Amino acid sequence: MNLHFKNRIALFNTVAAAITMLVVFAAVYAVVYITTYRHLDSNILVERAELFSQISTVGDSLVFSLNAEWEEMEHNRAEVDPIFLQMVDDRGTVIFHSRNLENDKLQFADSLTEELFFNVEFNGKKIRQGQFPIKTEGGKIIGQLDIGISQVDSILILTNLRNTFFAAFPLMLLFFYGVTSLVASRSIAPVKQLIAYAEKMNYNNIDPRLPLPVHHDEIYHLTTTINALLERIETGRSREKQITADISHELRTPLTSIKGTLEVLIRKTREPQQYEEKVRQVIHEVDSINHIINQLLYLARLDSGNLSIVKKPVNLYDMLLAVKNRWRLQMNSKQMILKLDIPQDTVVQADFGLLEMIMENLVSNAVKYGYKQGQLVCNWQADTGILSISDNGPGIPQEHLPHIFNRFYRVDVPGSTLVQSTGLGLYIVKMLAGIQGIQIQADSQINRGTQFHLHFNG
Ligand code: ADP
């Protein structure tokens, strides 16, 4: 059933109220029922005491004389509130009965030892009956006394109670449902307001300020949480816009440079070494474009979860030597050196391609951001299984350090405008390390350098 929230609240409350009312009614009814029948039984006991006072025994025989007063009383109430009396001897012969019994008999038991109370129908009327054994002084049972009292009054009380409840029950539930639904509707008004505001928003129109409700309750908390979320989406969105603009710019710079170089080249015929120099410049620019596009492709593959990992033994020394050779030109142009402080037989368990991408990124950062004549050291600690790649470059300010592995996070370093930067490198490194079970951590000190530590766990 597709119920509105307020109706669902009202329905749940009404069901709970209905169950409570039923339980309370059952308890009240039980108390009234027990009290009423106790009252009838105590009336029967009063009659019994009165009658027993007029019964005596001679040997095993019953001697019994009703006094005139009792007869008069019984006569008077015969119509209004009849009490039926019957005395039976031990052979089952009725030796006395009240006039209102006429030719009928009350129920009597063949062998009654204890007094007994029960409800029974007599001449179409419900009566409460008590059966009492009559004993000699020696304790021998020589007959029984049966007393019946009409239940009309008690049944009337109980019926009235029942009817009143069953008539009032649906009305009370209806009233309760109405009131709760009204209260619920007022309580969820702020939620409706939130929905109305949220419906007006779309990707291009995010207003991160939903109106806060007056009361500091769960809805207030929900609103502040949504506001914080919208704020984050808004920040992320504008950062991504900025990054898209930056990446376009980064791509345009080498493209413009390539175009310029090629235009200069075709203006006139040149010496072979001039061609060679210009072609080398173009190759360098193409490499930059290639790097940016590679990072974007990795990002897309990471996002789609499409990277397959094949962990195998990888020789760290050989891998870093190959990386060093690939970066030889750039390092030479900055007069930088890379020291491999790693035993040649160092082997780790990793995916070759993904680990190589990690090394490329870390070495490329150290070269990109490092000072001229800087020094890079790759160090392996066999006992802890930690590979550290350290440089003595400008370092990363402490306030940026916790964020450098975030997607698109870049540190604006003065004088670094020439450096091609997307803010994706370390994010990709962290992700690639994570999926291989390698932990990565960075330490840095301004003007002293930066160290990246890779923990290989087994
Ligand atoms: P980018 O593509 O900008 O290099 P990264 O995610 O690789 O992106 O690096 C994030 C930021 O961390 C960079 O903008 C840079 O300022 C800083 N950084 C990374 N490595 C180094 C390093 N070795 N020395 C100094 N700063 C670094």
Image (cartoon, grey):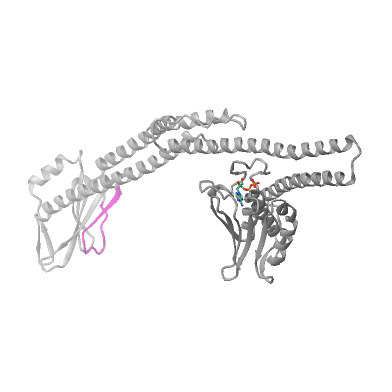
How many badges with numbers are in the image?
Answer: 0
Which residue is depicted at the point 63% across and 49% down? 369
Residue 89 visible in the picture: yes
Q: Is residue 134 left or right of residue 457?
A: left
Could you tell me residue 308's position as x and y percent? 71, 57
Q: Depth check: 216 or 445 in front?
A: 445
Above or below 395: residue 11: above
Tell me which secondary structure the magenta stretch mostly adopts: loop
Quarter that holds the N terminus: top right
Q: Is residue 166 left or right of residue 307?
A: left
Could you tell me residue 11's position as x and y percent? 45, 37
Which residue is depicted at the point 21% across and 59% down? 115
Is 110 magenta? The answer is yes
Report the span colored magenta: 105-122
Q: Depth check: 103 or 115 in front?
A: 115
Could you tell me residue 315's position as x and y percent? 70, 67
Is 13 magenta? The answer is no
Above or below 168: residue 409: below
Q: Is residue 268 left or right of residue 306?
A: right
Which residue is depicted at the point 12% across and 53% down? 51
Residue 312 visible in the picture: no
Quarter that holds the C terminus: bottom right
Q: Quadrant of residue 13?
A: top left
Which residue is depicted at the point 60% across and 70% down? 382
Could you tell me residue 292's position as x and y percent? 72, 45
